[in-house]
Amino acid sequence: MKGEVGRIFGETSAFEFEFVVFNPRDVRRGDYVKVWNDVEGWIVAYVTDVIAKSDVSGEDVLKGRNVEAEVYIAKASVIGKRENGVLKAPRTPFVPGEKVFLAEESLVAEVLGMSDDGVYLGLLGDTSIKVKLDVNSLVQKHVCILAKTGGGKSYTAGVIIEELIEKGVPLLIIDPHGEYASLKQPNDVKEEMERMEEFGIRPKGYSNIRVYVPPGSPFVDRADGVIYLDGRNLDAEEIIELGNITSPSAQALLYQVIRELDDYTLEDIMDRVEEIKNSSKSVLLGALTKIQKSGLFSDNPTPIDILLQKGRAVILDMRGVDPAYQDLIVARICGKLFEMRKREEIPPGMIVIEEAHNFIPERGFGKAVSTQILRTIASEGRKFGLGLMVISQRPARVDKNVISQCNTQIILRLTNPNDINAVRKGVEGLTAEMVEDIKRLPPGNAVIVSPELERPVIVRIRVRKSRHGHAVEIFGEKRGGRKKSKSGGKVERKEKKDGGFLKKIFGG
């Protein structure tokens, strides 16, 4: 057993206590301690703060007299003990004078409910305890990753994607900035490779990744295929956004024509508009022609089932594509995948939405045609085996209903007051101390809230096995920052359909 580090004093309860710290080098904020209770046994608590107190007067300070802290006081929040697999809180207050010890890592892992298997995210605080989350819970109940710009959200998403690929979870990654194709290549950044032993990993690239791009992308020659959408029966809202139709009379003409048509294509709409005498005719025809020339819609569209296949990750790289077209692509593809999953025509899997504030904006921060289907997947997807990973650097601008549907939240550093307020309101289980931690998290550290864990925890996100797509931020020392370094289409048929998602469908 580790030696005694302090003694409880003052007013205590069954939920919190304070203790005098013998040596400030032994106890720090974020540590886990244990206290013996004659009735309950060993009880584990979390150190929320350590403060220094002095009996030197303010006058002494002003006169420049030597000031030394007389005593260090730690505040602890009680977690409890695990009994028969269930976390139990003590029912009696702690006794002043009781000895306080640092908790062994095995005891901390047991009390927090750490799993021996699952999606490996990183190490708990300053310990060597591996934080792993159940793959089924992570996928079924959705996950969001939130951080300020440059805070490591895409890096963290890459870590989770690596884990899901290794566990055979089908993935579709919506990638507006081309950050994820580098998953194919092993991590060769020297500083990160030096830290892999700490996390117990080795460099690895993933060959079971396919990259698709929309027509007109400047990266068609590097892609595995081109995505063509079915242009039949586009609704008026989609056409208005794609064609940037701002004229109310042109919009009215479009609605009129679509009401008169049943099963139609863009060409059918254009032919009907040609027959009508209307002052907005030329404006509408110009917009429709622009959409037609984009090449996005085809009479031979790409089979959507190739985008979610067992044992494969598909990246939809939309760099250089007009945001309006990105929005429609996401809306159409996600809508089709959801309907196909309900009919069990594709296997259970997860859709990763990078820059989610552009595709699921909160009311008052813009509109997107993809919003409704993504809200539907967030609220109903778990029933049918379609999960969401939502990634954004602006939590306040992401639809709050979608964020609230994500049971696992991974929050890296945030400093914007609006974003912090959105997280405070939308994430259950965050204490005031944890909110303060979020403002000051070092690079590479995250607060993780999950139904798999008994309380929110701070985790050092592990180094990536594969190469990060953009300028790589290298994880630094424990409790430290990161250094900066430079980092460097054939259509395939669907897999056999897979059901039973609400059981444990993803092994390992």
Image (cartoon, rainbow, N blue to C red):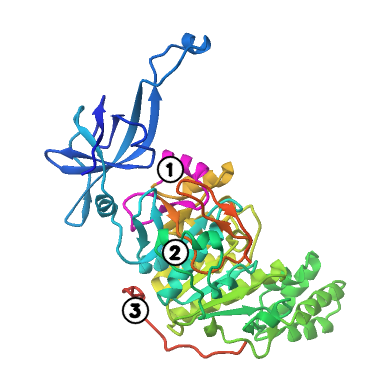
| Magenta part of the chain | 430-457
User: Which residue is pictured at 36% across the width and 58% down the height?
Assistant: 131
Q: Which residue is mark 3?
A: 500
Q: CA distance from mark 1 to mark 3?
A: 37 Å
Q: Is residue 241 above or below residue 148?
A: below
Q: Position of residue 68 (x, y in %)?
A: 42, 19
Task: Assess whether mark 3 and mark 1 are in contact (beta carbons under 8 angstroms).
Answer: no
Q: Which residue is mark 1?
A: 434
Q: CA distance from mark 3 to mark 2?
A: 17 Å
Q: Which residue is mark 2?
A: 142
**SS for tag 2?**
loop
Q: Earlier in the sequence, mark 3 or mark 2?
A: 2
Amino acid type at circle 1 is Met
Q: CA distance from mark 1 to mark 2?
A: 22 Å
Q: Is residue 391 visible?
A: no
Residue 501 occupies quadrant = bottom left
Q: Is residue 436 above or below residue 127?
A: above
Q: Position of residue 54 (x, y in %)?
A: 39, 18
- Image quadrant for the N terminus? top left
Q: Earlier in the sequence, mark 1 or mark 2?
A: 2
Q: Is residue 41 above or below residue 298?
A: above
Q: Is residue 494 above or below residue 88?
A: below
Q: Is residue 456 magenta?
A: yes
User: Which residue is pictured at 42% across the width and 39% down the height?
Assistant: 433
Q: Residue furthest left?
A: 39
Q: Position of residue 504 (x, y in %)?
A: 32, 73
- Image quadrant for the C terminus? bottom left
Q: Which mark is residue 345?
A: none
| Left or right: 211 in relation to 94 | right
